[in-house]
Image (cartoon, grey):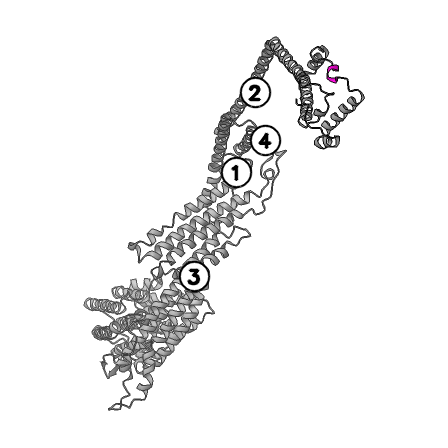
Amino acid sequence: MDLNSPSMSIPQVEQLLSDNDASQTCQKLLECYLKDKQLNLLDLQESIRSSNSFVSHTIKNGTQGIKKELDDLNHAIFVVDSLLNKNVINYTTEIIQSFQEINEYMGKLSDISSDLEDLNERMGSKYKNILLLYNSVESDTASLEKLRKVYLYSLECRKLILFLKSLHKRTSYLKSSVRDFLEMLLISHKCMRCLDRIYSLEKTEALLKLIRYCEDLKNCILKKVYNNAIVPLFEWNNNQNSATVDLPRDLEKRLVISQVIYKELSVSSKIMLELVENMIYEAAATINIKEVTSEHNYREWQGILISQISEFLLKYVRNQKSIYHICRSTRHSLPEKIDKNERELLSSYLETYVHEDEKEPYSLCELYTKRCVGVLHSTMSALNKEGERYDVVMLAPQLISLGDTMHAELNGVKITFNMHRYYFKTLCEEYAKSFVSVAAKKIIPVSKMSFLNCIRALPTLESSPTQTGGNAPNQAGLMLMNLPVDNELWTVLQEFLEKSKMCPALFKQICAIAASGLETVFANIAQVRSPQGCKLSLSDGGSKITLLKPNDAQILNARLFEYTHAIVHGIERKLLHLIPEDSPLLRVLDYGRSIPLIGSWAEDVASTVWHTASYISLDNQEFNWTCSQVSVASRNIVKILNFLKESYFEPLIPLGKYELLQGFASTTVASFLIYAVTIWPLSDEEKLTLMNSSTEFEFTLSEILQAKLPRNESENLSFFRRLIFLSDGELYQMYSEEACAMPRDVLLLHMTCRLLRDNGVKDRQLFKHMNFTNVHFMLQSFRTSLVTGQDHNSKKLRGFVSELGLTSQLYNDIMAHLNGF
């Protein structure tokens, strides 16, 4: 240490000392040397080496105490070193006489450190074995503790495994009874308690295996519940016609218990959503869009699609009923659905059981409806994107009708969500509006255009000058050139009426549109028709019938009749029972039917035929005509019929012939028969002639009608062919037993004719007794009985017969029968 450094004043020393400890130490040293400058304070300090008490005291304090003393010494050295560096001690040679004193002090400190190391070494060698033993014991104790924990863990796992195995085994024996389901509920409860215990254990690979084993048990329970509760529900619903039918009691119990099991296993929402998804997937599989859009099915795509949608909706209805019953089962509390004995089985479980009311118990029904309607909507949208090739709009009535039918079957599904309204709003509403719009755009323009050229030509034709010969202008011939070549209106009407008939709301709107269009058309037809063509040109020139070919007026009216008949009869035959009573279409159809076109042709023909037959009785002699006369008249009638068939009916009336000529056929058959049954007696040859005439008559009429004769006329002809071969006894028996197809007055007329002719009665005139002016009018009255099938003349005829006073067997039988009344 350099003691000859420049002097410094005390204020400078204080200024150099920056920390309080150094400053205080210096102050104390200075104060001490001011009192006695001759003292060597370091020498006066007790030697550390020679102080056993210091070392002993320090060692007793332990490691922390030794460390503290060393820290104090280091601090003292640091203070002294600081004083040296700050040139404070350079001015106090009296305090520290030489640097060696410091070195000695440092030596003492070094010796102390050496002694401490030696002491530490001796302590380590002396207690090493003890420390090793202690550490070994401590390590073994820790290992044993770990082994104990492992043993307890494995023991717990083994207990859980054995318990789960016992539950699994019990589950495998369970089937479908209510008691089995209650047992499954208890097993489910225990399974979940096991799972809670498992999750509380330390997470190891063994724990994962336990969890998997527990999940296997859960899956086993869920599978049994599904197979014995859910599957039977679907099977039962598929065999029912109504959702209002209550479930069988056992099945309802199983459903309620299954819902509790699902909640116990914490899988209720998951299972129900999976169930809905599976049902949607199963139903959606019925719609094959590739089959619908296949090139091979281009013409039949609508039928294929509707068939697929029908199958889809059938599955939807059945599944919705099942979902409804499942949802309804969640609303029932378990205790209220099980019996007393069953409650005893669950007594411990029911102590903690709490039934929770669902906020939206039928949300699954709503979800299933929305998903299924979404599938249909996606299908229709996909087809709609294909453009005009797939006219999806035209399927609107069928979609609505299918929806109505479907939701009628779901009438018993009482939920807050309106399934029917959602189906209509989402899937059908826009298509329905478009359907009506398209119908109006097609029907109204066609109705206005059909006879537009004819109506435009009318003023010109009506104002044209009369032709030579005094005849009216041949308007009909010129009008024929402007008639529509086809019945496009009926084609359009048929399409929209047929498609909409399954949907009453749409059908009513289409009927209104059709009425508007038809009213225009029928009004035009009423203007275009020719009054001259309403009657057939069949007139007699004495005993000869003049047959004329159809003129233009008749052809025009026949064409108009065909046009009108196709529409009126088409609608009435298929759709009349569907048309609402307040629909204007009914009024328009009546108007179209009443337009005078060819409605009187049947009456004209019948009158001509009757006129031809009436020449047989021209001499007014009752029952004096012969088979040859009737045969000639029948041949003339057949000629007339063939002429009409070839000239009128086949070329002019391809449609509506049967309806038009039914009355004509009835009158014609009656005209022939009323003369044929009044011929007597008949030889075998004459009988064969009449039989052949009647057969030819029937065939000719059938050809004209292009159908069999009406039943009444066919039976009358058939009975006549039998009648002419009957004996008197057989005839009376048939009359008395009322086993005759003909009216009784006509049969009695034939019997009267036999009585008169067989007994040679010539002075009695039946027509006078019946108050007719001639024979022809009397026969016309009996002809009316044949046409109507009703007896009009028996009373007067019985009075006439009773006055004859004959003695024949037939007469006696008849009188005995008449007197019996």
Residue at (65% x, 13% y) in the render: 111
Tell me if residue 786 can be seen: no
Task: Indicate whether 289 appears above or below 715.
Answer: above
Tell me if residue 409 can be seen: yes
- Amino acid type assigned to the residue bearing label 2 in the image: Lys
Q: Quadrant of residue 80?
A: top right
Residue picked out by circle 4: 345
Tag in front: 3 or 2: 2
Judged left or right of residue 342, residue 774 is left
- Amino acid type assigned to the residue bearing label 3 in the image: Tyr
Front-most of residues 198 and 40: 40
Residue picked out by circle 1: 267
Judged left or right of residue 468, residue 272 is right
Task: Magenta stretch: give its range.
Answer: 39-45
Secondary structure beneath dot 2 equals helix
Task: Indicate whether 327 appears above or below 796.
Answer: above
Tag in front: 4 or 3: 3
Q: Looking at the image, is mark 2 or mark 4 earlier in the sequence?
A: 2
Secondary structure beneath dot 3 equals helix
- In the picture, which quadrant includes the N terminus? top right
> Quick check: is 195 in the magenta stretch?
no
Residue picked out by circle 3: 431
Task: Indicate whether 167 appears above or below 714.
Answer: above
Residue picked out by circle 2: 149
In the image, residue 684 lies at what x, y percent?
A: 20, 66
